[in-house]
Image (spheres, grey):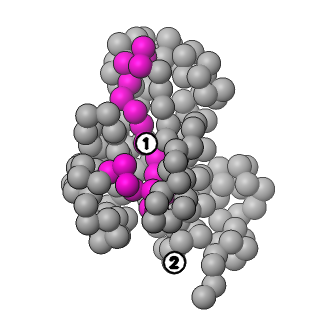
């Protein structure tokens, strides 16, 4: 994972996941809401619960909430963390077997595809807990977890605290 240049409006950095060109993968971009400059003028999607917020906040982005993912040239956006993207599909897009893809993915990122996806889901949950008032069950679904208990298990394993305790500690009060 590499961080991009600071966004001119917010000073925050875009987080960009880049995979080597020889893997045949498009760039996969994970953005904070303050980092959507990469999507200006592009078609993109996000989880349905966040689509209106994305469209309102970034009118230059053509948000399509009715699809699982949008492949716009070199940028892929999804309706949830890895929504609709499984290992076989990723491997097929890369032109390699699932085993080869998993091996190359681990060599490049230091983790398995599943662990990377779980980490991205927890990262998104952290952002939603900090920036929204969504109930934990809604946060779980927005992040690709089937239930709040599944979110709690993975969130606690990754952060050492529960989603509710995390929200209390890290929500900005105005």
In-image side of 74 versus 140 (left or right):
left
Image vertical order of residue 73 relative to residue 55, above or below: above
Q: Nearer the viewer, mark 2 or mark 1?
A: 1
Other-residue count near label 2 (Cα within 10 Å), few / some / many at <14 / 14–19 / ≥20: few
Where residue 113 sits, quadrant-wise, is: top right
Q: CA distance from mark 2 to mark 1?
A: 25 Å
- Residue 62 percent location from the top left of the image: 22, 56
**Residue, disc 1:** 29
108 to 76, vertically: above or below: above
Can you see residue 136?
no
Return the x and y of residue 15 as percentages of the image width and height.
52, 46
Q: What secondary structure is marked by label 1?
A: strand
Instruction: Looking at this view, name the residue that lies furthest to the bottom.
Output: 174
Q: Do the numbered discs 2 and 1 sit on residues whose CB atoms are within 8 Å?
A: no
Residue 26 falls within the magenta-colored stretch: yes
**N-term-proximal mark, 2 vs 1:** 1
Residue at horizontal 73 percent and vertical 73 percent from the top: 169
Q: Residues within 10 Å of mark 1 (few under 14, many from 20)?
A: many
Which is nearer the eye, 109 or 74?
Answer: 74
């Amino acid at each position: 994972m590499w961080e991009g240049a600071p966004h001119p409006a917010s000073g925050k950095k875009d987080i960009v996941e880049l995979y080597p060109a020889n893997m045949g993968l498009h760039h996969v971009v994970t953005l904070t809401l303050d980092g959507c400059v990469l999507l200006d003028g592009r078609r993109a999607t996000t989880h349905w619960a966040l689509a209106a917020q994305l469209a309102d906040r970034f009118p230059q982005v053509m948000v399509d909430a009715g699809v699982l993912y949008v492949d716009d040239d070199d940028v892929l956006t999804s309706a949830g963390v890895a929504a609709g993207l499984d290992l076989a599909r990723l491997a097929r897009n890369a032109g390699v077997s699932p085993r080869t893809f998993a091996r190359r993915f681990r060599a490049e990122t230091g983790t398995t595809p599943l662990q990377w996806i779980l980490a991205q889901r927890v990262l998104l949950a952290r952002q939603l807990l900090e920036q929204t008032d969504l109930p934990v069950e809604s946060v779980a679904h927005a992040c690709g977890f089937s239930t709040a208990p599944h979110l709690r298990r993975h969130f606690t394993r990754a952060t050492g605290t529960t989603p509710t305790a995390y929200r209390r500690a890290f929500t900005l009060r105005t």
